[in-house]
Amino acid sequence: MTVGIDDIAIYIPRLFLDARDFAEARGMDPDKLQRGLGISKMAIVDTNQDPACMAANACLRIMQRDNMSPKDIGRLYVATESSLDESKAMNSYVIGMLEQVYGEGSFEHCGGIECKFACVSGSYALYDNSNWIRAGEADEKSAIVVVSDIAKYDLGSSGEYTQGAGAVAMLVNDKPRLLEFDPKVTSTSIKNEYDFYRPFGKETPIVHGQYSNLLYLIQVKKALMAYKEKALATGLIKPKEGETILDHIDFLNMHLPYSNMGKKALAYLLRHEWRKLPRWKKIIEKIGMEEPTPKDPRGTIESVLADTDFMTKDHEFTKKFTKTEEFQETYDAKLSSSLIASQMIGNLYTASLYLGLRSSLEFEFQKGTNLEGKRVGFGSYGSGSSAMVFSGVILPRYKEIVKDMNLEAEIGNRVKLSLEEYEEIHENKRSPQENFLESKKEFILVDVENAPESRGERRYVYNG
Ligand code: COA
């Protein structure tokens, strides 16, 4: 049975912070952000926007574009780590907003929950909704999975330059035009960790950035190994002598807390897969040094990070590896297009991976690549921590969707914030009414109740 993504819509706030302005204001070298991390702009929410209204805006876009009515939708799941309530699920807010347009009670048949597992929960939501369809429960209806987040870190912290905001809605059904999921290969890894977390009541996360980066790589590699076993066992991928499964994945989409993390992940996974192959000998000759190993190869992440001699050599090795023709060719062909949107928008937590998919479709299409039949691999990671690796194949009707993709037009006219304006938003110094931008044809937040009996109730309107 075919199940997959039929269409994909984005909602990105129009306010942005320029990475160069930001770096100069914080006394940093702008090259660290632009070249070192791959960040040129960070999308910032206006005072009258929150993760729920971004999610509702993305859902409305996909429904309007595909002429869908609420009766065509059987499930609406929201995956986020920017939860607004400890109990009330974000999809209830989203349905409340959509019913302002489609009529009260129009979504009453539509089940769903809010899913949480840092940045990976959107992938679990997609998997669960695909299985709802595979189980024959969908009754010809589609599911909408919407991923929506505001990546917000403390002022002056090292996470502050990896912020961003936005939502991606995906229509999932049994007649997809865009991408069909490969069956029986989805694989996960999970471990109790504190690399990045946000305790109750705290607006910004506690982050151990370098630890989290390494954990991301290890967890995704473990999930990839499990995927590989399944892909070989089911015969989905049949590598020839001297090949790896990665040779059979045409495009890779990685979770992108910042765009260059995709490149780091690709280098890590290729090293892991290529070092057993004949091609590695030639690459090692080009690099001109042996691949370093930590003093304690079976040690903890802390012991590896504390092994400064290994970390320095490994960093040097990775840099040299990423300059080889073999890496560059793979990077250009499989990954580079997926990183463009992240450079323009920043971190979207749950939505980063799917903004990457959107980016690779749009920019590969612009290059004139024939995408039909190409396999897309997904490396999803959520702190705390879990990874999920899965894949899908681009379907013959993909052009119907991809031909109209235009990231800049879909974001609309972007407005640059000054550092002072950004800090006012960041520190919640303005009310929803003190917004920067006029909004049209979208949902906005108008009020959050403060009275004891209604504290936290949020009111939204559709600005038609
Ligand atoms: N010019 C060019 N590049 C520069 C530079 C300069 N002047 N200064 C530094 N760089 C490069 C570094 O070499 C490094 O690249 P490399 O690793 O490829 O060598 C990169 O910029 C980042 O520098 P680094 O010192 O490692 O950055 P940092 O200590 O400021 O931390 C993060 C970066 C990403 C770890 C930090 O921003 C963070 O924790 N962000 C949050 C991440 C997150 O959300 N994780 C959640 C789970 S995925």
Image (cartoon, helix red, strand yellow):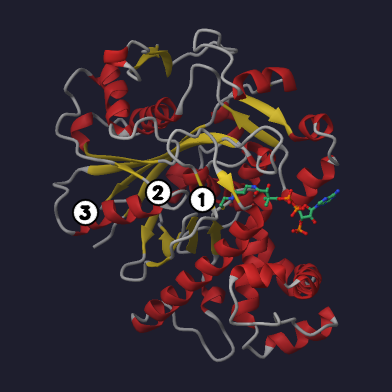
Q: Badge 3 local density, few (<14 within 10 Å), some, or many (20+)?
A: many
Residue that appears at 50% across and 14% down: 439
> Mark 1 vs mark 3: which is more N-terminal?
3
| Residue 172, above or below 10 | below
Instruction: Report the mark closest to the observer, 1 or 3.
Output: 1
Extreme residue toward the top, this view: 433
Residue 122's mark?
2
Number of marks in the image? 3
Distance Cα–Cα, label 2 vs label 1: 9 Å
Measured as percent of width and height from the top left, residue 194 is found at: 51, 55
Instruction: Report the mark closest to the observer, 2 or 3.
Output: 2
Residue that appears at 57% across and 35% down: 152
In the picture of the structure, the residue carrying the numbered disc 1 is 353
Amino acid at the residue labelled 2 = Gly
Do the CB atoms of the residues marked 2 and 1 lie less than 8 Å apart? yes
Distance Cα–Cα, label 1 vs label 3: 22 Å
Measured as percent of width and height from the top left, residue 362 is found at: 56, 45
In the picture of the structure, the residue carrying the numbered disc 3 is 133
Q: From this viewpoint, is residue 353 visible?
A: yes
Quadrant in the rendering for residue 105: top left
